[in-house]
Image: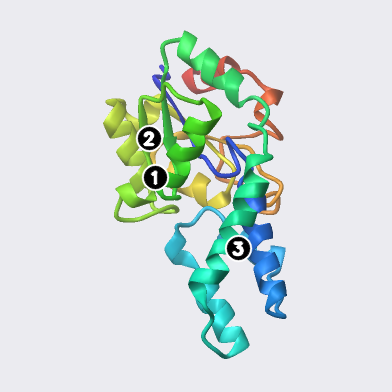
Amino acid sequence: MIRALVFDFDGLILDTEVPVFTAWAETYERHGQRLSAEFWTSIIGYGADRFDPMADLERRVGRTIDRDAVQVVRRQRQMELTLALEILPGVREWRQEAAERGVRLGVASSSVRSWVTGHLDRLGLDGWDCVRCGDDVERTKPAPDVYMAVVNCMGVAPDEAVAVEDSGVGVEAAKVAGLFCVAVPSSLTAGHDFSRADVVLGSLAEARFGEVARLVDR
């Protein structure tokens, strides 16, 4: 029986990966460099320690950059783009249906807690039973740590939980942790390998949570 539903955040609840990439790509352009979308998709889902854009940019231009000044402009642009985003289709409906069934709700993200909870609060997406982020665990995705932390926090077994992910890295983390995993590729992760996912949907609006829960229970 399914007792918990665990969402990733970036690219799954809100398509923040596009603003993050766009803001960094524009930063690179101002320094005469190109940050390719193809490369960026390869690091989506990992923690912040996977790739350091500032260090990469300094290496490319061959000099030290005023990081604080660059980051102020980049973060402002990133936030401007992020604030214009809508919650992705089906997210509210899955949350509501799960809650009505008595299913616990969690978030498992490789991003830092302040980023995740800040946006969840801003969007009015409260009522989570547990939120665990990259700075709550020793290893970020594709390691299973954040998923194990969430299910332990909610007091459920991994095989009693459904994870919803938008990246191949996230799917790997969920499956290693022992969760049933629904993959919903985002605009930047459509080319990822989702072969380990139990179900792949174009959008959460394509199916009801109960339909997926029945698949697991069978």
Q: How is the image coloured?
A: rainbow
Read off the residue under disc 2. Answer: 131
- In screen coordinates, is 144 left or right of 81? left
Sequence-wise first label, 3 or 1: 3
Q: Name the secondary structure under disc 3.
A: helix
**Residue 49: quadrant of the picture:** bottom left
Q: Residue at x 44, y 53 (%)?
A: 142
Q: Most extreme residue toward the top, as rendered? A: 100
Give the x, y percent position of residue 216.
50, 23
Q: Residues within 10 Å of mark 2 (few under 14, many from 20)?
A: many
**Residue 105: quadrant of the picture:** top left
Numbered disc in front, either 2 or 3:
3
Give the numbered dot on residue 73: 3
**Residue 159: quadrant of the picture:** top left
Real-space CA distance between mark 2 and mark 1, rounded to the nearest whole angstrom: 8 Å
Q: Amino acid at mark 3?
A: Val
Give the x, y percent position of residue 114.
41, 45
